Amino acid sequence: MTERASVSIVIPVYNERDNIAALLERTMRAARALGRPWELVLVDDGSRDGSTDLLAQAARDHAGEVKALLLNRNYGQHNAILCGFGAAQGDILVTLDADLQNPPEEIGALVAKIDEGFDVVGSVRQDRQDALFRKVFSGLINLMVRKSTGVTLHDYGCMLRAYRRRVVDAMLSCRERHTFIPVLANLFAKRVCEIPVGHAERAKGDSKYSVLKLVNLQFDLLTCMTTAPLRMLSWIGAAISALSIGFGALLLALRFVYGPEWAEHGVFTLFAVAFFFIGAQFIALGLMGEYIGRIHADVRERPRYIVDRVVGETLGDRPGARSTVTIPN
């Protein structure tokens, strides 16, 4: 990759009206400091607080530098990023959240690591300012991803990341509808690294990830990355069967020693065993349902998103550049 490789900064935005002005000012200042061609691709993910108009105005005010992709409704953070990837034209693509908890000033450090030959550069948030429950969920996600993929990275939840163009093109060629971009990128990357970055408290607005959404994210991660839970169920079933045989033998022996009265003739024991098996069956059915639901979503092949309109032109819209992708198959 040449020293003057172009950079696309992709930022999904959802109801971040109060942060947009500072986001644009800081991000554009960091981009100009790169000393190379760049573009800022803003993806409005169906905002309802006026963010859409602010992004469109920013694209008009900064023609040639900022492009706004305005989706017709909310499709989720990762689909919005994939939309931005489809429209971005840079050789290096950087993703950033719009809440300014991760500093845009770190973009230069990410790009520098890509220049060293890495395919994907992640970031590890230092001295995180999030609530305890978010830190706990983040830790669970990171542990689960490491165990499932075998790739030892420490902070998959931080969206301040950089990707080489060929990795992004490979991700865009994937057809699944439920995906987690940092994990998907690792499937196509040869060299991956992380760098430490700062982390700040959210200055304005509210987090878009509630406890329920974090739980849903856990299920998405679990079922889009691996079939290990299904295999685990087989092992659990075998273990439960073995324990049940041993438990039944123990009950039979104790019945001969103490008689049927020692455990109310075994009624409560049988209830406990029955409820245990019923619960295990529901867990198994729930996990199978998650996989089947994702298969159902994929075979329908509906678009991940629909772009309502595009405002602004950037380096990717110059003659000879590849065309903007708005509605992928």
Image: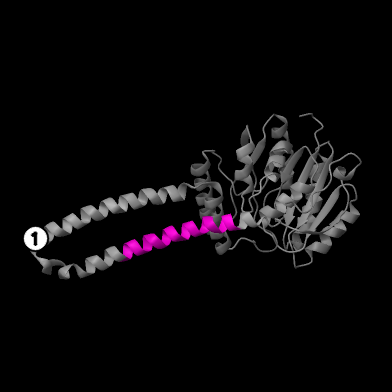
Quarter holding residue 4: top right
Residue 15 percent location from the top left of the image: 73, 63
Q: Is residue 238 above or below residue 112?
A: below
Color style of the picture: one colour
> Where does the image place residue 173, in percent across and percent down from the top left?
69, 44
From the image, tell me which residue sits under label 1: 256
Is residue 290 among the parts visible in the rendering? yes
Residue situated in front as seen by the camera: 163 or 197: 163
Asked if residue 255 lies in the magenta stretch, the reply is no
Q: Is residue 224 left or right of residue 80?
A: left
Q: Secondary structure at mark 1?
A: helix
The quarter of the rendered structure image containing the N terminus is top right
The magenta stretch spans residue 286: yes
Q: Please state if 28 lies on the left or on the right of 288 as rendered.
A: right
Residue ID at (72%, 36%): 166
Relative to 316, is 146 on the left or the right?
left
What count of labels does the image hold? 1
Crowdedness near tag 1: few (<14), some (14–19) or many (≥20) residues, C-alpha within 10 Å: few
Residue type, numbered disc 1: Phe
Q: Main secondary structure of the magenta part?
A: helix
Q: Can residue 132 be seen?
A: no
Span colored in magenta: 275-296
Q: Is residue 37 above or below residue 292?
A: above
Q: Is residue 85 above or below residue 258?
A: above
Which is more toward the observer, 79 or 18? Answer: 79
Q: Is residue 95 left or right of residue 216?
A: right
Instruction: Name which residue lies at 51% across and 50% down.
Output: 139
Q: Position of residue 69 (x, y in %)?
A: 80, 55
**Which residue is pictured at 27% across the width and 65% down the height?**
272
Residue 193 x, y percent position in the rendering: 62, 35
Residue drawn at x 90%, y 55% as measured from the top left: 60
